[in-house]
């Protein structure tokens, strides 16, 4: 079983890691860590556009609640505290070895996949 989630959603479902460790379920978890709710940011840009606002009228920043961080979340440490080993992947060259380690591991495993969280804004 593979569970793919974003970092924002993962914060609400960490009990699944403990359950997988406790019952020795071989679930594999991938957390896409982009530092925020990118989908919400993109939806907000679309909303402003649909309301006829020009990009120069957009607020300078997204609402603070759209950011996941400060403090930075260490999903590998959180998983480890719940009995699930993991690996952080921050570079493309680290992806294949992390997947191999995950598939070789007999039991639950987490990959914290660091992604670019920027949301391109339209030009003025």
Image (cartoon, grey):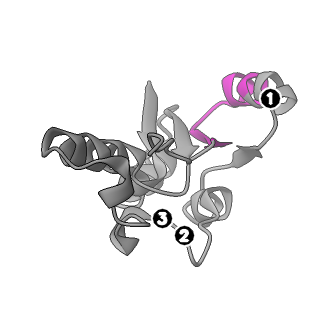
Q: Report the residue marked by disc 1.
A: 92
Q: Residue at position x 56%, y 47% from top?
A: 118
Determine the secondary structure under disc 2: loop
Residue 102 sits inside the magenta stretch: yes
**Furthest residue in direction bottom, as rendered:** 71
Please give left or right for residue 36 compared with residue 75 in the image: left
Disc 3 versus disc 1: distance between alpha carbons? 22 Å
**Numbered marks: total:** 3
Residue sitting nearer the eye, 36 or 17? 36
x and y, in percent, of residue 45 in the image? 31, 46
CB under 8 Å between discs 3 and 2: yes
In percent of the image, x 57 and y 77: which residue is there? 70
Look at the numbered disc 3 and give the secondary structure of its residue. Answer: loop
- CB within 8 Å, label 1 to label 2: no
In the rendered image, which residue does mark 2 sit on?
69
Classed neighbour count for the residue bearing mark 3: other residues with Cα under 10 Å, few (<14), some (14–19), many (≥20): some
* Label ID, residue 67: none
Earlier sequence position, callout 3 versus callout 1: 3
Magenta stretch in the rendered image:
99-115
Residue designated by label 3: 68
Toward the viewer: 103 or 87? 87
The residue lying at 51 percent from left, 41 percent from top is: 120
**Residue 107 belongs to magenta span:** yes
With respect to residue 97, does 41 lie above or below?
A: below
Q: Looking at the picture, how far across and down is residue 77, in whole percent?
A: 67, 64
Q: Determine which quarter of the picture holds residue 105.
A: top right
Marks 3 and 2, Cα distance to the nearest angstrom?
4 Å
Work out whether mark 1 precedes mark 2 in sequence or the reverse, and give the earlier one: 2
């Amino acid at each position: 079983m593979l569970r793919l989630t974003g970092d924002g959603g993962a914060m609400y479902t960490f009990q699944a890691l403990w359950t997988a460790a406790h019952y020795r379920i071989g679930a594999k978890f991938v957390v896409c860590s982009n530092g925020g709710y990118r989908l919400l940011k993109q939806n907000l840009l679309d909303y402003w556009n649909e309301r006829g606002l020009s990009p120069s009228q957009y607020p300078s920043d997204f609402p603070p609640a759209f950011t996941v961080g400060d403090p930075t979340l260490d999903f590998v440490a959180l998983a480890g505290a719940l009995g699930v080993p993991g690996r952080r992947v921050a570079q493309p060259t680290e992806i294949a070895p992390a997947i191999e380690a995950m598939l070789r591991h007999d039991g639950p495993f987490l990959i914290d996949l660091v992604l670019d969280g920027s949301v391109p804004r339209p030009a003025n």
